[in-house]
Amino acid sequence: MNSSCSVVVIAKNAEKTIANCLSSILSQTLKPIEIIVVDNGSTDSTTRIAAGFGVKVVYESVVGRSKARNRGIKESKGKLIAFIDSDAIADANWLAWLVKRYEQGDLAGVAGSIKALNPDKLSAKLLELATANKPHYGGGNIMYERDTIIEVGMFNENLQMAEDVELAWRVLKAGKRIGFEPRAVVYHAHRESMSELLRQQYNFGKWSTRARKIHGMKTWKQRALLFATPLLLLRNLPKIRLHPFLPIFMTATSVAYSAGALAA
């Protein structure tokens, strides 16, 4: 593997999780050329703890995931940039699998898989089951060519959420490809409260719909889900073999997403 890779971690008030996150990155079988922690307005000990690991720490006072990630991109030197959140832990072979998949084909980026760090919590376990082995463009586990990100205009700082998906759309519109490597695993601390998780889905529905509008995409399907609850439940019923509550969970999150889309 000859491709140099930087790792960017965005963090805000992450003093309880940043140490485990950085330890997992420093323990990678494929070592990154640098680790950049972007402290995005923390008021706790995040910066001090991160600095203690000998990584590069920069402070971005303008709060926002896009702003923080863009700052990390500007500070980076690698040909590739891998992104992970501060409340996540990377599998020891995470970076190796991402880079290996990238080097196998004509790709501008590679997404990995996200599993629950807290599967003992019902909502976290259900979310893991609902999203298992599905390709995604989430900023919590994805790697891009640095030049490609810059070429398409970097993350949209006007979006509070769905900025990662919207960036991927621009990459794809530019005629480039994003691969998926399920063996590149990141364990993320999912929401443990169902109400928090549904609120998150609502907000994602709102911001992803705004992102779709930017690209001239239709949004009626996302909005119509709210009025098709019985059909959604029926469609999700086969998932009962994975967990008895999974069909209800998937229906509820779809409805929350659709409500957010209507509010966009």
Image: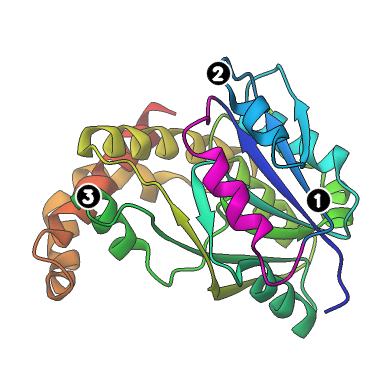
Q: Quadrant of the N terminus?
A: bottom right
| Residue at numbered disc 2 | 44
- Mark 1 against mark 3, which lies toward the viewer? 3
The numbered mark at residue 149 is 1
Secondary structure beneath dot 2 equals: loop
Query: Residue 232: where, in percent of width, then height?
Result: 19, 58
Name the amino acid type tagged 1.
Ile
Q: Is residue 60 left or right of residue 255?
A: right
Q: Residue at x 54, y 66 (%)?
A: 91
**Cα distance between the residues tagged 1 and 2:** 31 Å
Name the amino acid type tagged 3.
Lys
Q: Residue at x 72, y 33 (%)?
A: 51
**Cα distance between the residues tagged 1 and 3:** 36 Å
Q: Nearer the viewer, residue 244 or 120?
A: 120
Q: Residue at x 30, y 39 (%)?
A: 197
Residue range highlighted in magenta = 13-31
- Mark 1 against mark 2, which lies toward the viewer? 2
Query: Residue 228: where, in percent of width, then height?
Result: 19, 50
Q: Residue furthest bottom?
A: 104
| Residue at numbered disc 3 | 121
